[in-house]
Amino acid sequence: MHKNNLKEEIIRISGASPNKCMKCGKCSATCPSFNEMEIAPHMFVDMVIKGRVEQLVMSDATNHCLSCFACVERCPRGVEPAHIIEAIRVIKLRQSGAPQITPAQIASVIDTEIPQQALVSAFRKFRK
């Protein structure tokens, strides 16, 4: 996928508005995984803005995000860095060739103990 298409795909999947970022760094300052991440939350946002998305997709930094949403809560502009990181995870998953799921297949794999949110999340991640 072309980098501009990839950038737009990250923005579409995340629903975030990276251009609202004023680079205050509050998202990274509140991140409990900051010391473990080679790319901090504010850097994810900046790299999306600048179109350096291939580096994000190739990075292992998404695996260190705890999805605690502390960065989302702390952002004064509502940029939602965690949603951008999750969108990159989804793109990585789709590019890995992981099995895809269709609505027709859901009934055969459903477990009555799984919350609906998990099913919706899995469907969003495992479809193209």
Image (cartoon, grey):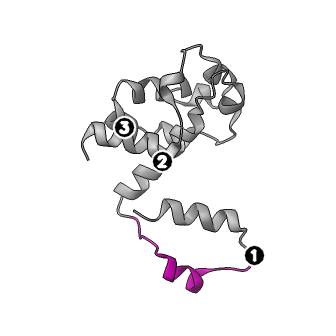
The x, y position of residue 94, in whole percent, is 39, 58
Q: Is residue 109 left or right of 51 when viewed as pictured? A: right
Residue 128 location, quadrant: bottom left
| Residue displayed at 62% across by 68% down | 119
Which sits earlier in the primary sequence, circle 2 or circle 1? 2
Report if the CB atoms under discs 2 and 3 are less than 8 Å apart: no
Q: Secondary structure at mark 2?
A: helix
Report if the CB atoms under discs 2 and 1 are less than 8 Å apart: no
| Residue displayed at 47% across by 24% down | 19
The x, y position of residue 77, in whole percent, is 63, 22
C-alpha span from label 2 to label 3: 10 Å
Q: How many marks?
A: 3
Q: Which mark is residue 7?
A: 3
Q: Is residue 113 left or right of 93 when viewed as pictured? A: right
1 vs 3, front mark? 3
| Residue displayed at 53% across by 30% down | 37
Going by the numbered disc 2, the residue's amino acid type is Ile
Q: Which residue is mark 1?
A: 113
Q: Which residue is mark 2?
A: 13
What range of the chain is rendered magenta?
98-112
